[in-house]
Image (cartoon, rainbow, N blue to C red):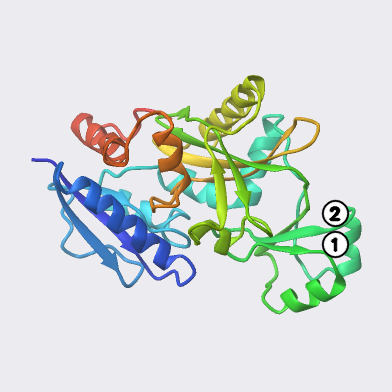
Amino acid sequence: MKKVAILSGGGSTSEREVSLGSGRAVFEALKAQMQCELFELEADRLPETLDSEQCVIFPLIHGEFGEDGQLQWLLELAGFFFAGSDSRASRICMDKSAAKIIAQQLGILTAKFCAYGGQSFEELWAFAGGPFVVKPNNRGSSVGVTKIYTAEDFLHCKKNWTRGQWIIEPCIVGREITASILDGRALPVIEICPRGGFYDYAHKYTAGATEYRVPAPITEFETRSVQGISEQIFQACGCRDFGRLDFILNDRGEFNFLEINTSPGMTATSLLPKAAAAMDIDFPVLCRQMIDFAFERKHTGKPYLNG
């Protein structure tokens, strides 16, 4: 019988609860289909009881350690087959600036950016040409994303910033669009419509705080365009199995690439399951498809079969 170990939790205080929710949801979906065990980790290390000969891994640890390639590197060293991108692709995609540079090399539009290195409010305002966004360069789940409109906003948030770990982008006015990837192919596109404010951590994980339009009410041309762009970036970053890419669609019909997520949330409000549902792929089937990539690699002994 196939056996899967689901890893959730970890030491990331900012994204631990989301990871635990993802792990429990996937465990409930898979336990009737195969032998599975849920690990809710307290620290950033592999459980000692895992056996690479007996199981494959479904990593659902978000944020630092879980998405930045560290967990994947440990799994690779220990000889485990696992769902999702490998350590190299995970490391690239967790680094927002690195992923944006890859998109630029493909000729894909993305907002200009710079690292925060002690610049004044006036310097950053001049760089952005107006209001700007500050975001952590290496975190997910919209943790720490802040829009800056005034010098007071800047002073209030500045105490949380450290050199080299935050990036600055101009505020782009437009519609928030996300494209999920499954087996290298884009699923139906979703428009994200926060009810007041913008799509920050609270809007992402508070039920009813955001409306999700699936499929997004955009033209067929725009849909094909953003799906194609998403598949390009996914492949160029070396990703495999599944992921999610975020964009802003401006009033000129242009998609501005924001970031790529190699370990999408799998909670009740998560976007990848919503996109799959639009193709009549229900949650248990989706979870089975996502872990089957790892089983197939284990069966063939080949680390890459897609992506």
> In this orientation, which residue lies closer to the viewer: 146 or 193?
193
97 horizontally vs 125: left or right:
left
> In this orientation, which residue lies closer to the viewer: 89 or 42?
42
- Residue 101 marker: none
47 horizontally vs 163: left or right:
left
Percent x, y for residue 200?
61, 60
- Residue 124 marker: 1
Percent x, y for residue 38?
22, 59
Label 1–label 2 contact, CB within 8 A: yes
Q: Amino acid at mark 2?
A: Ala
> Dot 2, crowdedness within 10 Å: few (<14), some or many (≥20)?
many
Instruction: Look at the numbered disc 2 and give the secondary structure of its residue.
Output: helix
- Quadrant of the image containing the N terminus: top left
Residue under the point 27% across and 36% down: 285
Percent x, y for residue 9?
35, 65
Residue under the point 62% across and 20% down: 220
Instruction: Determine if residue 79 is in view.
Output: no
> Dot 1, crowdedness within 10 Å: few (<14), some or many (≥20)?
many
Instruction: Locate residue 109: give its quadrant.
Output: top right
Mark 2 sits on what residue?
128
Instruction: Locate residue 114: give its quadrant.
Output: bottom right
Instruction: Look at the numbered disc 1 and give the secondary structure of its residue.
Output: helix
Q: Amino acid at mark 1?
A: Leu
